[in-house]
Each structure stands twice: as C-alpha cells, then as structure tokens.
Amino acid sequence: MSHIERLPVAVPLSADIEHRPDRAQPYRARVRWTEPRTKRRKSLSQSHGTEEQAQEWIDALSAAALRGIDPATSVQPLAAYGEANMALALRGLEPKTTDPYLAGWRRRVVPSLGHLPLPMVSNGAVDRSVYGWIADGCSRSTVKNSLAVLVRVMEQARRDGLIQSNPARVKGWQSEYHKAEDELDDPRSLALPDWAALTALADTLVARSHGRFAGWGEVVVFAACTAARIGEVSGVRVRDIDPVNWIWTVRRQTTPSPGGLADKRTKGKVARRVPLIEEVRPLVAQRLLAMGPDPDARLFTGPRGGRITTAVLRDATRWDEVVARLGYEHLRRHDLRHTGLTWMADAGVPLHVLRKIAGHGSLATTQRYLHPDLRSITEAGRSLSAHLSVAAGPPKPPGAVRRVL
C-alpha cells in the first residue's frame, strides 16, 4: 500500500504555573492536551527559575501546538530528534559524505549538544561547542563535517516547524585554521617538489608493500603526472586512452556506494581530457599491452585485480609511515593531484587550459595553483616593454624634447 502522510492536527493546550519556593527551580510550568487520534490525555511539565521563563516555555509550546506540532516532540532532546530524522536530513548525499557526517554526529555533536531540547540549541551553544572541538585539537575537516551534519538536522527541524531559524549556521570558526595548509588555502604547499621526489616516493611505497607490488608505484606516478584523483585513476579503462595523441579522457571515478565500490561520473559530472606526458607514456603503453584488446579492461588494479581506493592505497603501502620517513608528513593521496596541477602551473600552462585539465568548476580554484615568482614578474615587465617599443617605434634619445604643434 502506498504511503499516506498524516499531517498533525492543531490542538489547544491548557496550562498552569505552580510556585514551589522550596525548589531550586521554583516555577513549574505544565501543559495538558488531548491527543486527537487516540483521545488520550497527555501532559508535559518543566521547572524554571523565574515565572517569566515558565510563561515563555508555555507560550512556545502553545504556538507549536496551534501549528499542529506535537508538544512532546517540540521539546525532545536534539539527540533523539536527530536519530529519528537522520535519514531525511542526509537525503541525497553519497556514503563517502554521510560516513564522516555520522561520525561527527556521534563523536562530537551528541556529546556536546545532544542533551539539549531543540529550542535550547542556540547559536551561542553551537558556537561554544565548535570552538570546544577546535580546542580539543580537531582538524578543520573534522569540525566542518560535524557542523555540516548539525546544520542539516537543525534545518530539518526548521522545516518541521519546531524552530524558527537554524542556529547551527555559525561563521568565523575557520579563522582558527588560517595557519593550516590545505586545498582551500595553499594547495601548492602540499605538492611534491620535483620528479625525483615523486619517483622516490613511488619506489619506497612499492618496497614497503606486501609482495612489493609494482602497481602501487605506477598508480602514484600516473596520478601525479595527470593531476588526477585516486578514484579517477581506478576508473580509467583501456578505451579511455588515446595512444596516438597520448590523451586520457577522464569519464568516471570509483567511489564507495551502498553495497560496495561503484563507478560513477566524475566529480564535475563532465568528461575532461588530460595530456599524458612523455615521462608517463612508457608506463601507460606497458599497461595497455598487458590488458590486451579488451576496451573495458581497467588500466590499474590491485594485486588481486580489485578496484583501488585511496584507503586501499594507504593501507597496502603503509603510506603514513613512508611519507613520514621521507619528510612529507603532510602528504595525502589527494596531494598527488595538487602536485600535478602545481607542476603544470609552474610549467606555464595557461590558466584556462589548466582549469579544463583539472575539471574545476570555478576559475578561482585553479588560480590558487599560480605562484608568480620574481623572475616571472620581471619577464612580464620586459614583455610589456617590448610590446610598447614595437608599437611606438625606436626609442628617442635621453633628453629629447617633443615638439608640440
């Protein structure tokens, strides 16, 4: 049978305030109502420090009841409401996004704010919790994921009519991380310095992997030379490679999904073309030869033929241990992409071309990879001077006076 949504029915409340001077919270506010469907009599009460606070509580419940909201629901704790409505709050998100969101909910949001009734989750309470997470040493991404899930849950509560505005939309907390180096600030700082560093990393990862599987090194070199994400490297098929013009058409990425890994469209939902530089062509040619004529064969797989993810690469090669030993403690698998884009920018690839290769939706994102040094600035001045000299003819000798007609 199809689902039938039963809308809540507005109910009137009877209310009273009892003064109990011997209590720490001497004013007990109580509301009573009859549940329209079951005809059962229900009640709800809460103690307050002042009579004004008690009356405000009654007024808030009365307003909610007249809009058809169950008074018991309107004051339930944030943790209970979130658990009951989490699937609705996170609808439309992929598992690779919901997993860190749910971890943030369990480990940070619920311990900090879960005990508060929904109307008491204020902007100030959220703000103090966020700065508490920062003080505890949580990374920017950890705080961002925790705050994002709270925003979605509170937005669902706002749509349900339980609150008037979303108190989780706080600003300014990211200023605490201005010294952090990440993709949003300075992606260049996350790149490997040169080709020797890349090959040394690839060789060391292979040496530390079980069975010394050479494929891990090939994945690392290919990802850096093409400025690709690991999921995109995992998704490349034989038919995506043009060995005549040495172009890779990026059409898909491998990503976690319900039931396991799945191939999906690229992050930007649009295919893009990436050049295969001379340094990586022998590697690609060897892989094409090994895969044979099957156009749907994967160019890169794990030692047992399985699909590759950033987590698989990390665990199989002891990535964290290797990068620390090589002096690149900050280096993540995604920084291979930063490496490729930084090298291309330094090689003088035009900004609009670099954006197409990267698949960036915004030109501002691509601009972060540009780093004009003193030499390039000087050369820009010389180029302008040369252009003006050609346009104006030979320069006049010093001291020459122009006649004014």
Image: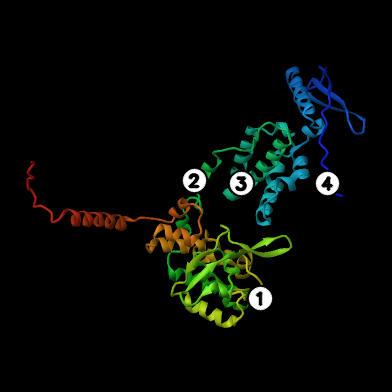
| Amino acid type shown at disc 4 | His
Q: Residues within 10 Å of mark 2 (few under 14, many from 20)?
A: few
Numbered disc 3: secondary structure:
helix
Q: Nearer the viewer, mark 1 or mark 4?
A: 4
Tell me if residue 15 comes above or below residue 159 in the rendering.
above
Q: Is residue 57 left or right of residue 236?
A: right
| Amino acid type shown at disc 3 | Val
| Amino acid type shown at disc 2 | His
Q: Compare marks 1 and 3 and give the one earlier in the sequence.
A: 3
Q: Nearer the viewer, mark 1 or mark 2?
A: 1
Q: Compare marks 2 and 3 and give the one earlier in the sequence.
A: 3
Numbered disc 2: secondary structure:
loop
Residue highlighted by disc 2: 178
Numbered disc 1: secondary structure:
loop
The circle drawn on residue 25 is none
Residue highlighted by disc 4: 3
Numbered disc 4: secondary structure:
loop
State the image coordinates of residue 405 (x, y, percent, origin top left). Answer: 8, 41
State the image coordinates of residue 238 (x, y, percent, origin top left). Answer: 57, 75
Residue highlighted by disc 1: 305
Q: Is residue 113 left or right of residue 244?
A: right
Image point 46% across, 55% down: which residue? 366
Residue highlighted by disc 3: 143
